[in-house]
Image (spheres, rainbow, N blue to C red):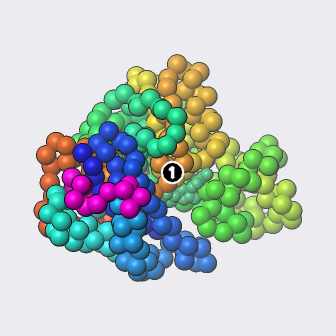
Amino acid sequence: MLVLGIESSCDETGAAVVSDTGEVLSDVVQSQVIHAEWGGVVPELASRDHARNVLPVVREALARAKTSLDAIDGIAVTCRPGLVGALLVGVQAAKGIAFGAHKPIVGVDHLLGHLLAVFLKRDEKPREDPAFPFVALLASGGHTAIYRVDGPHESMVRELGATRDDAAGEAYDKVAKLLGLGYPGGPVVDKLAAKGDATAIDLPKPMASKKSLEMSFSGIKTEIARMVREKPPKSDAEIANICAAFQRVVTSVLADKLLAAASLEAVHDVVLGGGVAANSELRRRVTEGAAKLGMRAHVPPLASCTDNGAMIAYAGAMRLKRGDRDGWDLAATSATVLPRATRKGRGAR
Ligand code: KG4
Ligand code: ZN
């Protein structure tokens, strides 16, 4: 089965052709650079850019896969969560294509896409799929949570813990902005952190209790804002030290909570997903920590971590395979349907 996947929930327009076994025939991602000067995603600009890019990106995905709509078995599209105006562009494009080509359409929850991205097979050395059930950390610009995943469908995913406030990627982006490093902040902070001395600055570790799977990243961001205001860094080396100290705290919280969750659930496979899973220190901590505990860490290649159409195509293929179809009333909505265990700002439910 071949599925065309379309992604437009935030600032990446993505389209991909993927098989139901996870083979990626093509994966085209057009990142919107227009937001950099604003220091964050501007929803209206995002929608307009998606509208300009979505059809060229779909055409390119079909061309790179050396296929045509005739050979496609279904269309999958991100329908939530995200910026509604941005999602709407992808959903309407998918409906138009599906209607014109007489193909079934299925909506996909973006978070489920991230959780299943580990099954994508790109041109790389063969990798072993995780076994269900697994425990996954999804850390991106909009979400940070730990899930138990019993199968490839929404109803088989349970949140075990999440951030009470900022998402980890959001904290990266805000710290980068405070340090004048531009947007998005994750990749540049990651790079500078490797050059800095994490012990040069003392930062408290938030929600360090081993028992709780909740997280919090707004305090550390505020702490860095205070530090930068009171004693602005004077050299590249000082900036690198702040990046290193920040990264050490954030990645150790994420890795510790993920591994604690896997131990509590008595699960053997741990998985990373979302843009922050591209982080070098997080990848290392999870891989080394899992090995020490006799667990298997599954760390997808970078292209599968950040937003892309391939993960949406794969999650859609799982729905199409069991006969699911959505109607022309498929709507774009801002919230995920995955159950939440943590209430923003208020702790565990
Ligand atoms: O999953 P994603 O592409 O989009 C969302 O759904 O949010 O994640 C984007 C987030 C941004 O906040 C970006 O700064 C962060 O992922 N990110 C990273 C790294 N690469 C991207 N954070 C830390 N280290 C990285 N190497
Ligand atoms: Zn995402």
**What amino acid is found at the position of numbered circle 1 in the picture?**
Ala
Q: Is residue 7 visible?
A: no
Q: Residue at x 63, y 61 (%)?
A: 185
> Image height check: is 298 above or below 161?
above
* Towards the viewer: 115 or 58: 58
**Residue 97 in the figure: left or right of residue 194:** left
**Image location of residue 144, percent across then percent down:** 47, 50
> Image height check: is 245 above or below 228?
above
Quadrant of the frame with the N terminus: top left
Residue range highlighted in magenta: 63-76
Picture quadrant of residue 136 = top left
Residue 67 painted magenta: yes
**Residue 258 in the figure: left or right of residue 81:** right
| Label 1 CB sits under 8 Å from any ligand 1 atom | no
Q: Residue at x 25, y 61 (%)?
A: 69
Residue 221 painted magenta: no
Secondary structure under the numbered disc 1 in the rendered image = helix
Residue bearing the label numbered 1 = 303
**Image location of residue 39, percent across then percent down:** 59, 73
Q: Residue at x 40, y 65 (%)?
A: 60
* Towards the viewer: 61 or 257: 61
